[in-house]
Image (cartoon, coloured by chain):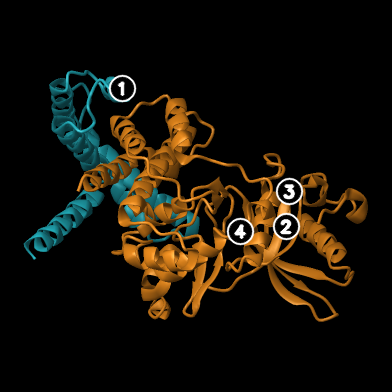
Amino acid sequence: MALSDAPPLNELITAVMEYLQTEIVPEAVGEKKRLATIAYSVLAVVDREYTLGYKLNTDYSRLLATLGVTDEEELARKIRNNEIDINSADLKKALRQITTMKLMIASPAFLERARKEAEAAQKRQAAKTEA
Amino acid sequence: MSVTTEDIGEEAASGNLSTGNLTHALQQAISWKLSDPGIKISQLEPLEGGSSRLTFSFMANSESGMDAKLVLRMDPPGVARPGSLVTEANLMLAALDAGAPVPRVIMTSDDESILGAPFVIMEFVEGISNPRSILRDPSLEKLRPNLAGMLGQALAKIHSIPLEAAPGLVQIDLLSQLRNQLDQLGEARPVLEMAIKALEQSRPKSMGTTVVHGDFRNGNFIVANDGVRAIIDWELSHIGDPIEDLGWLCVRTWRFNGPGPVGGFGAYNQLIFAYEHASGRVFDRVLLRWWELACTLRWAVMSLMQAQAFLQGSHRSLDKALLGRRVCEVEWDILALLNSMKR
């Protein structure tokens, strides 16, 4: 049960996004159009954080715990002070996962494109090794 | 090259930057410079550009037959950085002498009484500079396959500028600068710490000490189907390792989703071969990858600094707000580069 009445937060955000997309962006020109498009993107981030944030934050804390730290600040300090080996497979895997989770909220289109590129590069590498 | 207050009066010294005032002040400055009192300035219009400077295009005509489209670049009045634009203008002149494609500088001055802020006036170069147009415009079909090589040649020319011909440039060791900037940000990020550690552990031998353009990327060159017409935006120029310019050109952000690793349009080998051939500096893909990683880290740090300008209230804008959330894109690229360095 939540204190606030309907509509829920994500519905409110979506309503503003729809307004920007149908009423503002098509008619705006130049700098106004560019900024309206960015405003839409900012709200899309808010919407995804609202929907995915809770679960991803739980996963994030668990990942950090496997590295023996409570936050990224502490992890960064340990890397800087040579207390964690930067070649550690666990470290690399965790940072990859954390970055992926951030991208799921901030920039899923980038994530999809980058994954495709990485797959293609892997295939090229495999073909090279075979040849 | 400098002009004094006595020469052209104090019309613009008030700092009031209306188009009318600026046109009038420009007319006086150019008339003085070219010793032609009949010059008329018209069509003063702002030009798009991502830099911190104000940029305008305008027409200069006179009865004696002058008919030229020119560009004015100036510091925003009130936040002038004395010396900086004049250094940039002198460097552009030196680049022209070295045979690099660059707009011809007509006049420059640090004297704020002339136009209200330090400025440089140069010729307008016709062509295409929008990165997405460079990647997709059908009129550039013939150019695109050769562009990476042409840029390698242009870079070799820039890197051949004698250091004494470019006074006022600061020497920057990119890695030390990044370390300092990361410390000053006060926001420790594991991926960035990992990157700088890896860079420190694998630092390659220096390829020399030369002029470095500092912002040599898709968006800062003007091209036409017959070639590279001009390299612009010399604001971040410094003295450093020449391969830094090649690394920056390859950073993924400047590919604008194009398929080629060099600016979105070219292959690594095209750039390397052309540059090696023109400069005589011989290196391999591993060295370029080190610089690409260092430059990608540089972009992450620059993005964070801009996001901080938003957070601290000195620059409230939607772009800068979103840029903070996009640093993870650059971190993804850093992790991918770190992975490929091990191969």
Q: Chain of mark 4?
A: B
Q: Secondary structure at mark 1?
A: helix
Q: Circle 4 sits on which residue? A: B161
Left or right of B6: which side holds A43?
Answer: left
Q: Circle 1 sits on which residue? A: A73
Same subunit, tags 3 and 1: no
Q: Circle 2 sits on which residue? A: B19
Q: Quadrant of residue B31?
A: bottom right
Measure the alpha-carbon separation of dots 3 and 1. Answer: 42 Å
Left or right of B49: which side holds A122?
Answer: left
The location of residue B92, given as percent across then percent down, is 64, 59
Q: Quadrant of residue A92?
A: top left
Q: Secondary structure at mark 2?
A: helix
In primary-sequence order, the first of circles 3 and 4 is 3
Camera-nearest label, 3 or 4: 4
Task: Give the chain coloured cyan.
Answer: A
Q: Amino acid at mark 4?
A: Ile
Q: Chain of mark 1?
A: A
Measure the alpha-carbon separation of dots 4 and 2. Answer: 37 Å
Same subunit, tags 4 and 2: yes
Measure the alpha-carbon separation of dots 1 and 4. Answer: 43 Å
